[in-house]
Amino acid sequence: MKLFSTLCALVAAASLAAAEEKKFDAAKMEGKWKMVSGTNNGNKIDGKSLEGEVTIDKEKFTIKGADMTHVMAYKVNADKSPVQIDMEGKEGPAAGLKTEGIIALDGDKLTLAYALPEGKRPEKFESAKDSKTMLIVMERVK
């Protein structure tokens, strides 16, 4: 019985340590990214629209395309599941717009789903038809 109790305590401690390791760390998003796929209201985004570079620092996303630049300030709430992100346009066509989304980081893959105007924060990483949701998948540039 004592061995069983000790084993249970070790398993519980290991589970807590694993949970702490998996906690979202926004600092790990920092760097350069490229958009590799996307969906807007259930419609696949064409490759030309995904061209450009995304640079993330501790306060903002900067998206440089061929003909325009967007700068979005962001705040992450890692205490929610999925992790929530709130963004506000600071420069470019989205200046002044605010949106709510969710975000996930898996190694060198960053997935972002966010509400389009008049939409609500998505609960899943998807962009179904008429959902007023955009889904973007990015890969780290090495």
Image (spheres, grey):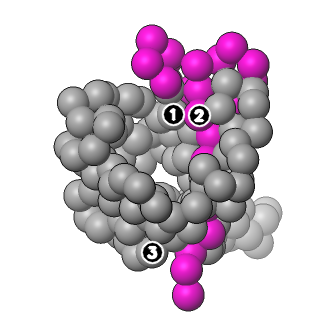
- Label 3 crowding class (10 Å Cα cut-off): few <14, some 14-19, many 20+? some
With 72 as the anchor, is 38 left or right in this view? right
Task: Read off the magenta span.
Answer: 116-142
**Mark 1 and mark 3 residues within 8 Å of each other at the beta carbon:** no
The mark nearer the N terminus, 2 or 1, is 1
Residue at 44% across / 39% down in the picture? Answer: 84
**Amino acid of disc 2:** Met
Based on the displayed image, in which of its 4 quarters is residue 81 positioned?
Answer: top right
**Amino acid of disc 3:** Lys
In the image, farthest residue toward the bottom: 142
The reply to whether residue 17 is visible in this rendering is: no
Mark 3–mark 2 distance (CA, rounded to whole Å) = 20 Å
Based on the displayed image, in which of its 4 quarters is residue 87 positioned?
Answer: top left
Residue at 62% across / 69% down in the picture? Answer: 139
**Mark 3 and mark 2 residues within 8 Å of each other at the beta carbon:** no
The percent position of residue 35, horizontal first and vertical second, equals 60, 60
In the picture of the structure, the residue carrying the numbered disc 3 is: 32
In the image, farthest residue toward the front: 67
Based on the displayed image, in which of its 4 quarters is residue 126 positioned?
Answer: top right
In the picture of the structure, the residue carrying the numbered disc 2 is: 134
Residue at 40% across / 41% down in the picture? Answer: 85
In the picture of the structure, the residue carrying the numbered disc 1 is: 114
**Mark 2 and mark 1 residues within 8 Å of each other at the beta carbon:** yes
